Amino acid sequence: MDPAFDFVAEVSAAVAAPLVIGKGATGERRIVPILGGRIIGPRLEGEILPGGADYQLIRADGVAEIEARYTLKLTDGALVYVVNRGLRHASPEDMAKLLRGETVPPERVYFRTTPSFETASPAHAWLTRSLFLGLGERQPDSVRVRIFAL
């Protein structure tokens, strides 16, 4: 049986310049503050509250391990905690551009995530009972992730 993908929503998050912690034993650590944004789609709609962050580890092979943590406030007032882990990589030249904050066409970047959700809202409990796939796109001052339920 082939998997079915159901489009849930698109996250559009404004981000600040990264805080570069520096290179350690496992790679370069960066923290990208999430300033806010929107989630809009057929199954979820609301805002991204300020205060989250994307914690990144840029490995020696150029692959970025990412883990974003942030909170959604949906249009019905429900709060949803999001942990979105994934990988991002491209050619060395394109990764260097991304890390400098430059635009790279999204088709040249592998950016996939696995968002998970926590909520106390019974209306949105379905978020805690499914697996999700995110297809990401990085812009100099924002991140977009299209989220699909499997």
Image: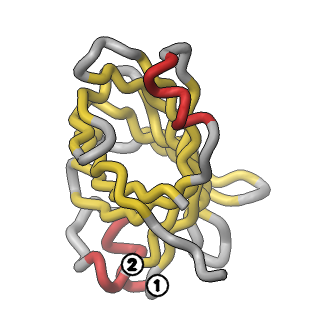
From the viewer's side, name the closer residue of 45 and 123.
123
Would you identify the image quadrant in which residue 26 lies? bottom right
- Nearest to the observer: residue 19 or residue 68: 68
Q: Is residue 77 above or below residue 139?
A: above
User: Could you tell me residue 105's position as x and y percent?
Assistant: 23, 79
Q: Residues within 10 Å of mark 1 (few under 14, many from 20)?
A: few
Quickly name the residue at label 1: 92
How crowded pointer 2 is (Cα within 10 Å; few <14, some 14-19, many 20+) is rated as some
For disc 2, the marked residue is 109
Which residue occupies 30% across, 49% down? Answer: 9
In this rendering, is residue 57 above or below 116? below
Are dots 1 and 2 in contact, CB under 8 Å?
no
Q: Nearer the viewer, residue 65 or 126?
A: 126
Q: Quadrant of the N terminus?
A: bottom right
| Quadrant placement of the C terminus | bottom right
The amino acid pointed to by label 2 is: Val
Q: Residue at x 31, y 73 (%)?
A: 97
Q: Position of residue 109 (x, y in %)?
A: 39, 78
Tag 1 secondary structure: helix
Amino acid type, residue under disc 1 in the picture: Pro
What residue is at 38 percent from the left and 15 percent from the top? 78
The answer for how far apart the CA atoms under marks 1 and 2 are is 11 Å
Instruction: Specify whether residue 36 is in view.
Output: yes
